[in-house]
Amino acid sequence: MKITAQSPSTPAEVAAERFARRVTARLSSGTDDLPYDISERLRASRMQALAKRKVVAPVKRTAPASAVISMGTSATLGRGSWWNAVVSAVPLLALVVGLVVINIAQDERSASDVAEVDAALLTDDLPPDAYADPGFVQFLKTSAHSN
């Protein structure tokens, strides 16, 4: 059974083909001394390998399309218009606006939390320095146990 293949076109394919032929010749040279059952198994294995061999189809080289244009529910390759660029930028703009709004809301919440703590400290009966005193923490612990 003779298998015909296309001639290699690149230097790498030529080198791979040359290497494959040398390996095949080397493997075939030692089969004369093998017993019949082993040589038959080798022949069957070769046939299976050749049957599974990937056939490479010739590749047509074409120029790539410059953009993807959506037409209804499908997409086609071609050149896009400025309107498509504007419409595709809308989600990005919405994301940026959303992140800015979230940042502003977080800043306002943080500022109101700090203002609430400051108001509680300033309107309390104790002076603010008392909270920084290590003895005050001990006083709070002992007074909590005695209650």
Image: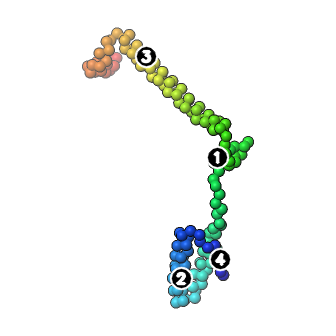
Looking at the rendered structure, which numbered label has been put on residue 116?
Answer: 3
- Mark 4 vs 1, N-terminal side: 4
- Mark 2 vs 3, N-terminal side: 2
Count residues near mark 1 (Cα–Cα under 10 Å), then give few for <14, some for 14-19, many for 20+.
Answer: few
User: How far apart in space, not on screen, are marks 2 and 3 (Cα)?
Assistant: 88 Å
Question: Does residue 111 appear in this view?
Answer: yes
Which residue extends farthest left? Answer: 135
User: How far apart in space, not on screen, are marks 2 and 1 (Cα)?
Assistant: 50 Å
- Foreground mark, 2 or 3, reads 2
Q: Residue at x 52, y 73 (%)?
A: 15
- Residue 143 vs residue 138, the one in the foreground: 138
Q: Are discs 2 and 1 less than 8 Å apart at CB? A: no
Looking at the rendered structure, which numbered label has been put on residue 79?
Answer: none
**Quadrant housing residue 35:** bottom right
**Quadrant housing residue 128:** top left
What residue is disc 4 on? 4
